[in-house]
């Protein structure tokens, strides 16, 4: 499953532009006074301004499976990586065969770079903004993750992520290329103490050559 585009809210479009263009070095496809559209590898990230918005999203980017350490070095003068424990910034998702690092954008959104070792996406050379391959996860907050998951499976032919222990509080749909992360309200976004909240999210997916448009 591929995430082609996600559309999110922000209360400060200029701060979003400065971060994604200047800090992460991503290309701005379109912009106006109320929105900005950003190329993130093969995916598109769009923010629409809402001055009343007062929450955050969690989403992840796939990076080359062999370049986590290089990504950490690249991040050092750009963002403050979140410490997991004992000064370590790396999370080992053993069952998912992946490693990840976390940081915030200037709007407070929780971002993640994840190296998934079952993907054949090795790269040589130094890590840079072009090493951000695609949007690989977007968090969706729902009262019943399993119920929503089964609904999306029935309506759109999606499937639960086989590497995840899906439950009533946390479920994942898709595969290593792209995942919908379904969580119960007020479940803290790992690895923070920030409780999840339901926010308007629009998503465009590709699954088995079908284009799927979702709005939550």
Image (spheres, rainbow, N blue to C red):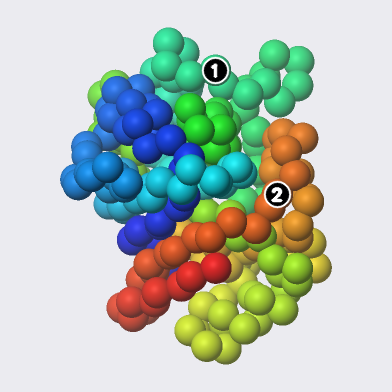
Locate residue 159 relative to residue 70 in the image: left or right: right
- Residue 118 percent across, percent down from the top left: 48, 51
Q: Secondary structure at mark 2?
A: loop
Mark 1: give few (<14), some (14-19) or many (20+) Cα within 10 Å: few
Please report whichever mark, 1 or 2, sits nearer to the chain's N-terminal start: 1
Locate residue 104 relative to residue 129 in the image: left or right: right
Disc marking residue 80: 1
Q: Residue at x 63, y 24 (%)?
A: 82
Gap in angstroms between the C-alphas marked 1 and 2: 21 Å
Q: Is any atom of residue 2 visible in this view?
A: no
Disc marking residue 99: none
**Numbered disc total:** 2
- Residue 83 percent across, percent down from the top left: 67, 21
Pick the quarter of the image with the C terminus.
bottom right
Asked if marks 1 and 2 touch (Cβ < 8 Å), the reply is no
For this rendering, which residue is in front, 129 or 98? 129
Q: Secondary structure at mark 1?
A: loop
Q: Residue furthest bottom?
A: 154
**What residue is disc 2 on?**
196
Q: Is any atom of residue 88 visible in this view?
A: yes
Residue 144 vertical position relative to residue 75 in the rendered view, above or below = below
């Amino acid at each position: 499953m591929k995430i082609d585009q996600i559309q999110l809210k922000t209360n400060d479009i200029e701060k979003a532009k400065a971060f994604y263009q200047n800090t992460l070095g991503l290309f701005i496809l379109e912009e106006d006074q109320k929105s900005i559209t950003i190329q993130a590898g093969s995916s598109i990230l769009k923010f629409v301004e809402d001055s009343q918005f007062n929450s955050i999203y969690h989403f992840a980017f796939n990076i080359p499976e062999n370049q986590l350490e290089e990504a950490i070095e690249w991040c050092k003068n750009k963002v403050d990586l979140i410490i997991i424990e004992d000064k370590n910034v790396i999370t080992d998702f053993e069952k998912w065969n992946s490693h990840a690092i976390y940081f915030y954008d200037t709007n407070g959104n929780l971002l993640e770079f994840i190296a998934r070792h079952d993907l054949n996406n090795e790269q040589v050379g130094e890590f840079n903004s072009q090493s951000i391959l695609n949007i690989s996860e977007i968090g969706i907050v729902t009262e019943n993750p399993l119920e929503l998951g089964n609904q999306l499976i029935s309506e759109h032919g999606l499937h639960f992520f086989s590497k995840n222990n899906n439950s009533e509080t946390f479920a994942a749909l898709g595969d290593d290329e792209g995942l919908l992360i379904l969580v119960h309200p007020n479940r803290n976004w790992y690895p923070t103490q920030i409780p999840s909240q339901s926010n308007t999210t629009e998503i465009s997916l590709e699954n088995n050559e079908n284009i799927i448009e979702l709005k939550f």
